[in-house]
Image (tube, helix red, strand yellow):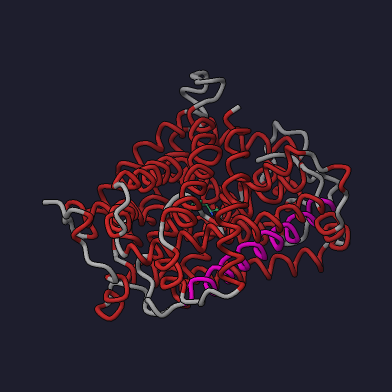
């Protein structure tokens, strides 16, 4: 039996909190949402795109994109989630029915749902690489320079190529990540998500600070790395770089995919959406910058290039680790940090679909999580095989993994963000917004609404068109 979206009562999110279904506190929500935002995007992508697009100037543009576009949409997404009080699809249906708008706005929820399925399926494969590397570091394989390799550099590329060529090993990493994700999400909001993030988010922050400290003490390149990240050289900045920065702000803040909406649906009515959003965006940005300060000094100290693409973490960095004292331990801690950062994101991506299945089909939490997780796991095999068995199979010149990455990061995320900005900024009544945001209608509220109505849609529209062309 399904519940028509319109008949679900308003304000359920706040009523859930006391009976143990919502977050136990606002700080638990902030921790979970910050955990969602902090992920492979911060550690794997941000440093190498910053490296590729010239460092400081890119970082500056990125910060502007986060504040002016990412943050307003993040606030909108959390507010819509809390007001809807149910799974994103139901939430759009209810909010629209309440104000007499078309029920077709539920499409935003559907799009988000498809996006989360696709995103998690390949994200989990990359997250699995960090488990493989954690194992390589612990077992000594990482630094056991093979007889056939002439240099650490060659050994590291062989190791990475070997991992990608081995479907069984990739499946193992992907399966472990999915199993952990299902185990956490299946236990519910308080018993699963909240317990996991309470341990993992502080843990990963401590590890990161430790790694930055290590990079500062063990290398003499910390100042060079800081200059690289913080001294803007605008000559290196291209129009393309600006669009990359904006696209990455979306990915990094986890907006446009309804993950934040689902987390918001469990948020207590008294919590400040604006305050929580600023905290989430702040933690996410600081972690991205700290990741750069942990990685670049080590990379520079070994004369390696900063912008070496996705291989930065799995080839360049291990080469550098292999040459420092205590490198094996530092490498193990680094890949543990990466795996934890990834897991606090994967659980947030599985949440919206779990919430939907739970409410739509009246399934138990465990059953809904298992169903969604298994489907995503199976889809992930397509990404696994695109590195080896089906490497040659391409669509529009992209293999399956790259195609999913393109469709989610370059199309669905900005499109979702655009529609959320339009819905919150132009469809939902101002009264609904003011009552939900609880921040009055002073200049902060006005600025937010202006950004949402006039700045976000054209800027996001431009990246969308640019990406599609
Ligand atoms: N923000 C996550 C990261 O930086 C990725 C993500 C995107 C998670 C969208 C949830 C939704 O890795």
Residue for point 36% across, 48% down? 109
**Left or right: where does residue 16 sit relative to residue 47?**
left
Give coordinates of residue 455: x percent, y percent: 62, 52
Give coordinates of residue 399: x percent, y percent: 52, 25
Picture quadrant of residue 129: top right
The stretch of residues the image draws in magenta is: 272-300
Foreground pick, 432 / 415: 432
Foreground pick, 138 / 252: 252
Residue at the far left in the pictured view: 1
Residue for point 62% across, 48% down? 248
Residue for point 67% across, 61% down? 330
Whether residue 191 is situated above or below residue 40 in the rendered picture: below
Whether residue 4 is situated above or below residue 308 in the rendered picture: below
Queried whether the magenta region covers residue 51, the answer comes back as no
Foreground pick, 168 / 347: 347
Q: Main secondary structure of the magenta part?
A: helix
**Left or right: where does residue 277 sit relative to residue 352?**
right
Give coordinates of residue 75: x percent, y percent: 51, 64
Queried whether the magenta region covers residue 298, the answer comes back as yes
């Amino acid at each position: 039996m399904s519940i028509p979206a319109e008949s679900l009562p308003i304000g359920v999110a706040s009523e859930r909190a006391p009976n143990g279904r919502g977050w136990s506190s606002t700080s638990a929500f902030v921790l979970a949402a910050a955990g969602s935002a902090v992920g492979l995007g911060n550690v794997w992508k941000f440093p190498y795109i910053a490296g590729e697009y010239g460092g400081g100037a890119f970082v500056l543009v990125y910060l502007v994109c986060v504040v002016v576009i990412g943050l307003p949409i993040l606030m909108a997404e959390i507010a819509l989630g809390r007001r809807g009080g149910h799974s994103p699809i139901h939430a759009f249906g209810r909010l629209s029915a309440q104000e007499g708008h078309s029920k077709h706005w539920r499409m935003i929820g559907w799009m988000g749902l498809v996006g989360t399925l696709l995103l998690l399926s390949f994200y989990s494969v990359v997250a699995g690489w960090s488990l493989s590397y954690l194992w390589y570091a612990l077992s000594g394989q990482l630094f056991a320079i093979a007889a056939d390799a002439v240099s650490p550099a060659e050994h590291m590329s062989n190791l990475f190529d070997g991992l990608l060529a081995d479907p069984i090993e990739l499946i193992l990493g992907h399966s472990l990540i999915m199993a952990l994700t299902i185990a956490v999400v299946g236990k519910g909001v308080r018993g699963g998500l909240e317990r996991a993030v309470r341990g993992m988010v502080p843990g990963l922050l401590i590890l990161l600070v430790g790694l930055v400290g290590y990079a500062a003490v063990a290398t003499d390149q910390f100042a060079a790395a800081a200059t690289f990240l913080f001294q803007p050289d605008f000559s290196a900045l291209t129009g393309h770089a600006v669009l990359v920065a904006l696209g990455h702000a979306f990915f990094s803040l986890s907006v446009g995919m309804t993950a934040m909406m689902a987390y918001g649906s469990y948020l207590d009515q008294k919590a400040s959406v604006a305050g929580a959003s600023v905290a989430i965006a702040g933690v996410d940005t600081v972690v991205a910058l700290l990741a750069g300060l942990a990685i670049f000094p080590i990379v520079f100290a070994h004369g390696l290039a900063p912008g070496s693409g996705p291989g930065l973490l799995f080839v360049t960095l291990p080469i550098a680790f292999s040459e420092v004292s205590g490198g094996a331990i530092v490498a193990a801690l680094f890949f543990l940090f990466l795996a934890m950062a990834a897991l606090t994101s994967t659980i947030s991506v599985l949440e919206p679909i779990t919430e939907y299945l739970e409410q739509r089909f009246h399934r138990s939490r465990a059953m809904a999580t298992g169903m969604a997780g298994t489907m995503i796991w199976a889809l992930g095999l397509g990404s696994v095989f695109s590195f080896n068995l089906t490497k040659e199979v391409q669509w529009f010149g992209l293999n399956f993994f790259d195609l999913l990455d393109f469709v989610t990061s370059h199309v669905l995320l900005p499109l979702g963000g655009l529609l959320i900005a339009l819905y919150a900024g132009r469809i939902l009544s101002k009264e609904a917004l003011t009552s939900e945001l609880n921040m009055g209608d002073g200049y902060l509220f006005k600025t937010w609404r202006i950004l949402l109505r006039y700045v976000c849609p054209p800027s996001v529209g431009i990246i969308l068109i640019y990406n599609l062309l």
